[in-house]
Image (cartoon, rainbow, N blue to C red):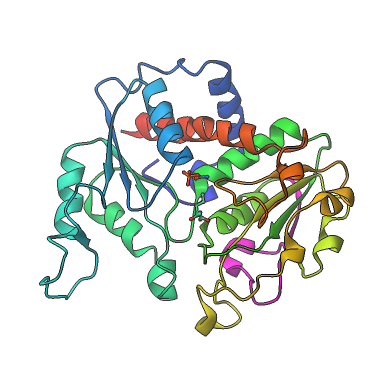
């Protein structure tokens, strides 16, 4: 596997989930695979789970790990071409990327959407430069439009906790005080569409996600109706994806606290489990009692990030 961006990159989902179970049963089973191999993780944005779980996964597989926080210690990087670099950026990405590729065997990239230019973000401009110029296999650790390591961990978690063959999974928008990217809901929708679940997306009008990720998923603008009988409630905020109105891309269109997931929302589900990728702002996305309830899966969901990363890195090591 040379790139891990979309659900198709992992191949057969049943096989990938079986591999996840195998690794979870013995995390050090493939420790010889990574001997004398180096993972480089590059962060343009903050992280807790991705940073820790991906490094742990690489270490489980016997790898060396280098972590670069681009905005803390490295030269500030210019990402645009055709500019005169007379500002505060000392190095261009097009030199930095092949140089970084010299020091590692594979690269993980975190580079969030800027939420200013939809075309630039949805072209995955930064990620594709790493793919094109690093000469190494590259996986996304949340980039402008995708977060596949998270979505894979979410699917592993749903498979572990489902009580029905085909559970109802609801992706619900919730309010936030900042404009957040669409990467997490995009990948969650893409992976749920590929999985054997009854998938529903609910959000206020104007927040329609890009159809290349939502596919034929049912969109329900009435949140309580969407949540009826749900087995899993996946809450997440995202800013306007700019699908129905491109001029609104990256904007906050609603701050309606009626969308905050509370006990009344969970009461209409079928003993539904609560999920969120974290970090989460309590009081905006979800109430304390819901996220602290026995039906909250946010911690095992985060723990499964080590497993999803392990499968992906193992696949890349096997392809080197
Ligand atoms: C894993 C989530 C990362 C990011 N969250 C924030 C707070 O920026 C997001 O919403 O995409
Ligand atoms: N869910 C997730 O990717 O968390 P971090 O942003 O803390 O890595």
Q: Position of residue 205 (x, y in %)?
A: 70, 76
- Find residue 116 and report its image quarter: bottom left
In the rendered view, tell whether residue 318 sits above or below residue 175. Answer: above
Residue 316 in view of the camera: yes
Can residue 206 be found in the magenta stretch?
yes
Q: Position of residue 27 (x, y in %)?
A: 49, 19
- Find residue 95 and report its image quarter: bottom left
Q: Residue at x 37, y 23 (%)?
A: 59
**Left or right, 96 with reference to 25:** left
In the rendered view, tell whether residue 178 sits above or below residue 161. Answer: below
Region in magenta: 196-218
Can residue 80 be found in the magenta stretch?
no
Q: Residue at x 70, y 38 (%)?
A: 158
Q: Residue at x 40, y 67 (%)?
A: 114
Q: Along the line of sight, which residue is nearer the eye, 292 or 27?
A: 292
Q: Along the line of sight, which residue is nearer the eye, 266 or 316?
A: 266
């Amino acid at each position: 596997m040379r790139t891990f961006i979309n659900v198709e990159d992992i191949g057969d989902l049943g096989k990938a989930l079986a591999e996840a179970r195998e690794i979870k049963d013995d995390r050090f089973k493939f420790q010889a695979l990574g001997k004398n191999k180096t993972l480089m993780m590059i962060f343009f944005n903050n992280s807790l789970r991705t940073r820790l779980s991906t490094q742990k996964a690489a270490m489980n597989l016997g790898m060396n790990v280098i972590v670069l926080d681009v905005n803390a210690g490295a030269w500030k990087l210019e990402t645009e071409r055709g500019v005169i670099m007379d500002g505060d950026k000392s190095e261009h990405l097009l030199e930095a990327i092949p140089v970084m590729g010299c020091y590692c065997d594979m690269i993980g990239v975190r580079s969030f959407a800027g939420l200013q230019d939809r075309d630039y973000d949805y072209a995955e401009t930064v990620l594709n430069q790493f793919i094109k110029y690093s000469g190494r296999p590259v996986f996304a650790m949340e980039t402008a439009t995708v977060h596949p390591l998270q979505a894979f961990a979410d699917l592993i978690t749903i498979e572990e906790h489902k009580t029905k063959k085909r559970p109802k999974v609801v992706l619900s928008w919730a309010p936030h005080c900042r404009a957040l990217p669409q990467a997490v809901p995009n990948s969650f929708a893409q992976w749920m569409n590929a999985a054997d679940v009854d998938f529903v997306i609910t959000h206020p009008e104007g927040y329609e996600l890009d159809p290349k990720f939502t596919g034929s998923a049912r969109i329900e603008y009435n949140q309580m109706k969407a949540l009826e009988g749900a087995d899993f409630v996946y809450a997440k905020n995202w800013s306007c994806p700019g699908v129905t109105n491109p001029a609104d891309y990256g904007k906050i269109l609603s701050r309606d606290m009626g969308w905050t997931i509370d006990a009344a929302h969970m009461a209409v589900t079928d003993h539904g489990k609560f999920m969120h990728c974290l970090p989460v702002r309590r009081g905006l996305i979800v109430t304390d009692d819901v996220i602290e309830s026995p039906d909250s899966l946010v911690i095992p969901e985060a723990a499964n990030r080590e497993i999803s990363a392990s499968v992906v890195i193992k696949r890349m090591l096997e392809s080197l």
